[in-house]
């Protein structure tokens, strides 16, 4: 059963500490990365046989496999994929940034150019749930950013095939190459390249402990989005909320994973108790009841605070991946919400809406990293370059200042390079 | 003497490989971080005595120390600091992003808010060169981003004092708190907080191997800008360039550090040889001749290619921190430059101009990471939050699609939370 705590009556650690799953796979992952770096496709195929039980001839999905997969998708589901993709495109298109130029002094031109990375790698987990929504959420921003080649990698089933819904989503989103590999070996291939997998510049997407550790180890060789922890929801709700709705929302997170966390923060003890009872009623009705039960009992919390202001303060301190704000006028509080990955406002906005269809991204900062990290966006697939142009006269006007500054720092070579062009005769 | 290589006649490794200094300080840094985390200021003071030779009573710079430092700065240098700060502010103000809102369907409001991090930590190296320019470059973007508290940390001298020029720059830039600490211990304090140093959310700034390793180890607990490698310049120049200017520019980089790298890529063997001779002539004239000599001999390269197009291709593959493009019409080539931290266009734009005064940032991606990383900017000090609002009718219109998508992924709890609000009677 979920635990109810009164804020101020338990220690702050009990309110704010997160279960941080620690699996030490550092050495194993280092070994996998080394092998893939040294032996390329050969190592990739070996690991796929070992970990996924699939004996493959090639690590790449063929056009024929894609065609076959598409025949297995109903027109109805295809339409939902297209609708979700259209919403995701609409939202993410607004993230596209312009380059800028500054040219308000004679002979001085400066600016910043926004340039997509050459290649992006998208990791999509395998396992029991085929996350075709993650395919859309991670590939579409890369394509909107203008990335020429988007490489998607996901582990195959024992039959050597990729789930048809994943392939259909990859088609809709516009992935350019699909690799049948999972775990640390897939991340290694994206970071260093193999015969079949091109080296990419940015690797994004959620994954298990092996994937997270591999991303940590290749960080610097390539860019990564984040090290994702277990999924989280924080529902902030007033006493007028419907307990059945809130319980359903908490369980939508809890069913993900035994280590997922679902937290309700409210100003009403009455609601707290009703939601607790609703959870007990609803858990047995879930297909994934066993997972949800463990998640709720181990990581679930109901925190009761004195007023809504304190509820919001607690939410900011926790900085959850998903934040639902179930109150009458949610926009009244929007300016107070500082730290959360994705915010769902009002009584009619369950997180599931954002997981699939609304348009904002569902790859989000976990473990309190929303204090400094952002949802996956077009920004993840671009980088900026500055440029500066001065005419000889413009340089002459500032060269002595530059040289004086450089000398102050003891860097006379810098000083010399600033003045040499205007000291001597013109080139 | 610098080495001249003909592109195509030597191996690609000789052209593209970088000297990657590897100092293994992992365990030492882990120990320092652990100590500061456990013992706070006490540990910080101990390490400062041990590594910087300064016995301090407090780790914070007092208002009296700031006042005293300002009396040591000439009005002329203060004016240069102010001028540089104004240029940096002007450039970085253009990086400020607006939040956006999408509201083109009935009952649906979505958007993205841009929010500054609560606190930022800026590391400024100590040592022989007091990098007051780095203070301006790293503090100003944080303040423009709207960060409420910017904490600057830099190691004191043996006398327990911070260089006056550093303090003056901190004043001009608007740093809110100045900490006398360097190395891994300073990074640990910024990541975890001590009695005197508040925990920050983002740590930026260059440093030695200890600082780089400490940033790597606290990555995830806080955000970091990048793991900086040795400084680099690549000068791309045509045969009409003035060899004396180019040699001065190469040396402005080489004087930084024995591991700094200075590379000239040109389509003219004649220029290559002249620059080589100029380097030999100019090195002895430098105050830091010994450092420059080692840098040029060990890491310097002159690469001669057949034409300018190939010169640009080589520059993109190397993706240098600083790129000078010394040709007649540099804007003709701007679209071809894809990977570089900061680009200096034309014959009158030495890198030193950008190091101090022009306005673009000088904290830049090194070691080829310009392929996926950006100059330090206002973006480093903000994060984004998404929000979504649906009315009950808007939810009802899509709930079945959301549920169908969720069921396809095997997540029936998600499906239930999408439909429960519109299935049952209104709350």
Image (cartoon, coloured by chain):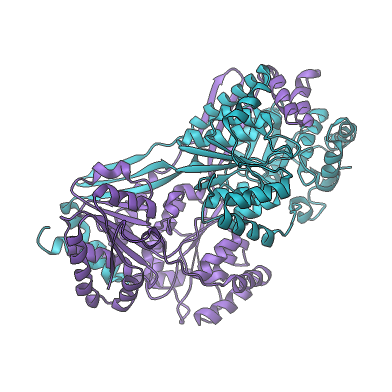
Chain colours: A purple, B cyan
Q: Is residue A185 visible?
A: yes
Report which quarter residue B171 is drawn in: top right
Task: State the residue in front, B400 or B23.
Answer: B23
Position of B201 with respect to B405 (left or right) is right
Question: Quadrant location of the C terminus of chain B?
Answer: bottom left
Tell me which residue sits at (15%, 60%) in the image: B422
Quadrant of the image for the N terminus of chain B? top right
Q: Is residue A270 left or right of residue B365?
A: left
At 62% across and 47% down in the image, what residue appears?
Answer: B186
Residue at the far left: name it. B425
Residue B123 position, x and y percent, is 61, 42
Dividing the picture into quadrants, the one containing residue B405 is bottom left
Q: Is residue B363 left or right of residue A355?
A: right
Image quadrant assignment for residue A230: bottom left
Image location (x, y in percent) of residue A193:
62, 63
> Residue A100's spot in the image, x, y percent?
50, 32
Q: Nearer the viewer, residue B114 or A170?
A: B114
Q: Residue furthest front?
A: B57
């Amino acid at each position: 059963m979920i635990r109810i705590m009164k804020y101020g009556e338990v220690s702050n650690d009990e309110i704010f500490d997160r279960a941080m799953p620690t699996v030490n796979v550092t050495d194993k992952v280092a070994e996998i990365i080394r092998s893939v770096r040294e032996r390329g496709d050969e190592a990739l195929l070996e690991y796929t046989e070992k970990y996924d039980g699939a004996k493959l001839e090639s690590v790449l999905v063929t056009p024929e496999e894609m065609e076959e997969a598409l025949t297995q998708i109903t027109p109805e589901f295809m339409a939902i994929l297209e609708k979700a993709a259209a919403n995701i495109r609409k939202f993410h298109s607004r993230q596209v940034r312009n380059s800028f130029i500054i040219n308000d002094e004679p002979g001085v031109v400066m600016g910043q150019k926004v340039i997509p990375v050459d290649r992006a790698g998208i990791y999509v987990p395998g396992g029991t749930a085929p996350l075709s929504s993650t395919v859309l959420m991670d590939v579409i921003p890369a394509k909107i950013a203008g990335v020429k080649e988007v490489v998607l990698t996901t582990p195959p089933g024992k039959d050597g095939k990729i789930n048809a819904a994943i392939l259909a989503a990859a088609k809709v989103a516009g992935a350019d190459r699909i690799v049948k590999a999972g775990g640390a070996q897939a991340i290694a291939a994206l970071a260093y390249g193999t015969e079949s997998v091109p080296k990419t510049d940015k690797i994004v997407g959620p994954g298990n402990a092996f994937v997270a550790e591999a991303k940590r180890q290749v960080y610097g060789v390539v860019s990564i989005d984040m090290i994702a922890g277990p999924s989280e929801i924080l529902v902030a709700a007033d006493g007028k909320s419907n307990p059945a709705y809130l319980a359903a929302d908490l369980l939508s997170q809890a069913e993900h994973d035994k280590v997922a966390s679902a937290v309700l923060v409210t100003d009403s003890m009455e609601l707290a108790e009703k939601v607790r009872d609703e959870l007990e009623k609803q858990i047995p009705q879930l297909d994934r009841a066993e997972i949800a039960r463990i998640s709720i009992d181990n990581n679930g919390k109901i925190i009761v605070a004195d007023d809504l202001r304190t509820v919001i303060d607690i939410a900011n301190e926790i900085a959850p991946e998903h934040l639902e704000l179930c109150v009458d006028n949610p926009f009244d509080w929007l300016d107070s919400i500082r730290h959360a990955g994705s915010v769902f406002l009002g009584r009619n906005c369950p997180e599931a809406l954002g997981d699939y269809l609304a348009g904002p991204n569902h790859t989000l900062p976990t473990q309190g990293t929303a204090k400094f990290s952002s949802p996956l966006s077009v920004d993840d697939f671009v980088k900026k370059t500055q440029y500066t142009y001065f005419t000889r006269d413009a340089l002459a006007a500032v060269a002595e200042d530059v040289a004086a500054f450089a000398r102050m720092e003891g860097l006379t070579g810098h000083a010399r390079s600033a003045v040499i062009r205007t000291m001597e005769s013109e080139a």
